[in-house]
Image: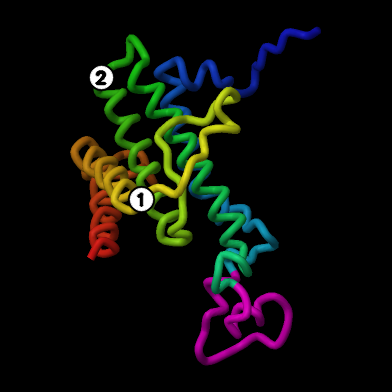
C-alpha cells in the first residue's frame, strides 16, 4: 500500500488542526458561495431564471421559455433550486460547522485570529440556514459537523422555526460584534454585511 503525502493540496488534518488551515477553510467557504454562479451549473439555468422572469417578453423556445411562462423555476420540484441550492447551502452549513467546532477547541491559536475565523464561519452558517429556510421551510439544522461515524444518523426531524431563528440570530450577533466595518481584503465579509442579513431576517420574522 502507498502512503499518501499530498504536496499540492490541503488535507483535512491540516485544515481542522492548524490556525493556517482554519483560515484556508474559511476562504473555501467564500469559494463555495461563489461556485454556483461562477460555474453556471445545470446548463446555466441558475442564470436563466433571473433573466427570464419578464412581464413584457417571453422567449419562443428552449428551457428559457419555460421560465418566462412560469412553467419552470417556480417550485423546488420543477427547478434547479432543489439540486443546486439545497446541495450548495447544506455543504456550506456543514463545512461552517466543522470550522467552528475546530476553531473553538484548537490550542495555540491567537485569540484575534480565532475570533475572526469564528465570526466569518458563523456568518456563512447563518446565511446558509436562512437561505435554506426561505426556500424550503421544511429543513433540518444541526451545528454538529458530519463525520464518517455519524453520516448516516445525524439527520433528525424538522427543526422548529424558533430554533432556526435562534441559531441564525445568535450567529449574526456574534459576527456583528466581531467583524470590522471595513477590510483591506476585497470581498471579505464585514460587519455591514452581517447587519444587512440580520435586517432581512428581522423582516422575515415580522
Q: SS for tag 1?
A: loop
Residue at position x 58%, y 66% in the image: 47
Relative to the observer, which residue lies in front, 164 or 74? 164
**Is residue 168 on the magenta stretch?**
no
Against 132, residue 78 (above or below) is below
Disc on the earlier residue, 2 or 1: 2
Looking at the figure, which quarter contains the N terminus?
top right
Q: Nearer the viewer, residue 58 or 70?
A: 70
| Label 1 sits on residue | 160
Q: Is residue 2 left or right of residue 185?
A: right
**Mark linked to residue 56:** none
Q: Which residue is mark 2?
A: 111
Are the residues tagged 2 and 1 within 8 Å (C-beta)? no
Q: Nearer the viewer, mark 2 or mark 1?
A: 1
Give the class, few, some or many, for how many residues have Cα within 10 Å of label 1's Cα (few <14, many ≥20).
few
Q: Quadrant of residue 199?
A: bottom left
- SS assignment at label 2: helix
Q: Position of residue 17 (x, y in %)?
A: 45, 15
Toward the right, the furthest residue is 1
Determine the residue positioned at 30% across, 35% down. Answer: 119
**Residue at position x 40%, y 35% in the image:** 143
Residue 186 position, x and y percent, is 37, 44
Q: Which residues make up the magenta segment?
A: 48-72
Amino acid at each position: 500500500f502507498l502512503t499518501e503525502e499530498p504536496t499540492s493540496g490541503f488535507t483535512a488534518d491540516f485544515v481542522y488542526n492548524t490556525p493556517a488551515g482554519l483560515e484556508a477553510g474559511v476562504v473555501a467557504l467564500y469559494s463555495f458561495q461563489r461556485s454556483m454562479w461562477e460555474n453556471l451549473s445545470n446548463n446555466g439555468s441558475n442564470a436563466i431564471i433571473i433573466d427570464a422572469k419578464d412581464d413584457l417578453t417571453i422567449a419562443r423556445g428552449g428551457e428559457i421559455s419555460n421560465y418566462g411562462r412560469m412553467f419552470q423555476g417556480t417550485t423546488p420540484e420543477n427547478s434547479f433550486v432543489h439540486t443546486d441550492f439545497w446541495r450548495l447551502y447544506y455543504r456550506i452549513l456543514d463545512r461552517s460547522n466543522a470550522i467552528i467546532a475546530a476553531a473553538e477547541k484548537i490550542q495555540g491559536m491567537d485569540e484575534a485570529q480565532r475570533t475572526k475565523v469564528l465570526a466569518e464561519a458563523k456568518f456563512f452558517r447563518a446565511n446558509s440556514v436562512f437561505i435554506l429556510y426561505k426556500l424550503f421551510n421544511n429543513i433540518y439544522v444541526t451545528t454538529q459537523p458530519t463525520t464518517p461515524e455519524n453520516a448516516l444518523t445525524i439527520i433528525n426531524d424538522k427543526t422548529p422555526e424558533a430554533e432556526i431563528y435562534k441559531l441564525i440570530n445568535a450567529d449574526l450577533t456574534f459576527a456583528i460584534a466581531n467583524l470590522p466595518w471595513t477590510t483591506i481584503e476585497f470581498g471579505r465579509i464585514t460587519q455591514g454585511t452581517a447587519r444587512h442579513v440580520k435586517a432581512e431576517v428581522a423582516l422575515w420574522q415580522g
